[in-house]
Image (spheres, rainbow, N blue to C red):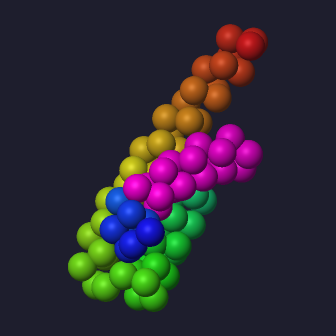
Amino acid sequence: MDELDIAFFILPLGIMLLSIVGTCICKNPYLMPMLSLVISLVLTFTIFNQSFLGWAVVYSLVSLALSYITLIVVRKRKESGN
């Protein structure tokens, strides 16, 4: 497994999964995007190079969008009684 597999397959899937699960547990849409940004920044300067910095921002924005979508879905399900 090389760095590209981690950067473009494993890391995005992990961030998506953690964003959904973390938002369901914590009910805070900002916690998981901040955590994903921190993880991505650490990986940028340890495993990858500075060109990965743009992807770190993109992954954080995807995490933010998924967190809001998850929060909306959880609230809708709670309102409908399911």
**Chain part drawn in magenta:** 9-30
Asked if one can make out residue 11 in the rendered structure from this viewpoint, the answer is yes
Q: Is residue 24 part of the magenta span, yes or no?
A: yes
Q: Label the magenta part by its dominant secondary structure.
A: helix
Left or right side of 17 for 46: left
21 to 69, vertically: above or below: below
58 to 24, vertically: above or below: below
Task: Using the image as rendered, state which of residue 56 and residue 67 is in the foreground.
Answer: 56
Left or right side of 32 for 12: left
Name the image quarter holding the C terminus. top right
Place residue 7 in its image quadrant: bottom left
- Residue 39 image point, x, y percent: 52, 73
- Residue 60 image point, x, y percent: 42, 60
- Residue 12 image point, x, y percent: 43, 55
Residue at the outermost front position: 1
- Residue 43 image point, x, y percent: 46, 79
Task: Using the image as rendered, state which of residue 9 and residue 23 is in the foreground.
Answer: 9
Q: Is residue 26 part of the magenta span, yes or no?
A: yes
16 to 82, vertically: above or below: below
Asked if one can make out residue 60 in the rendered structure from this viewpoint, the answer is no
60 to 22, vertically: above or below: below
Place residue 45 in its image quadrant: bottom left
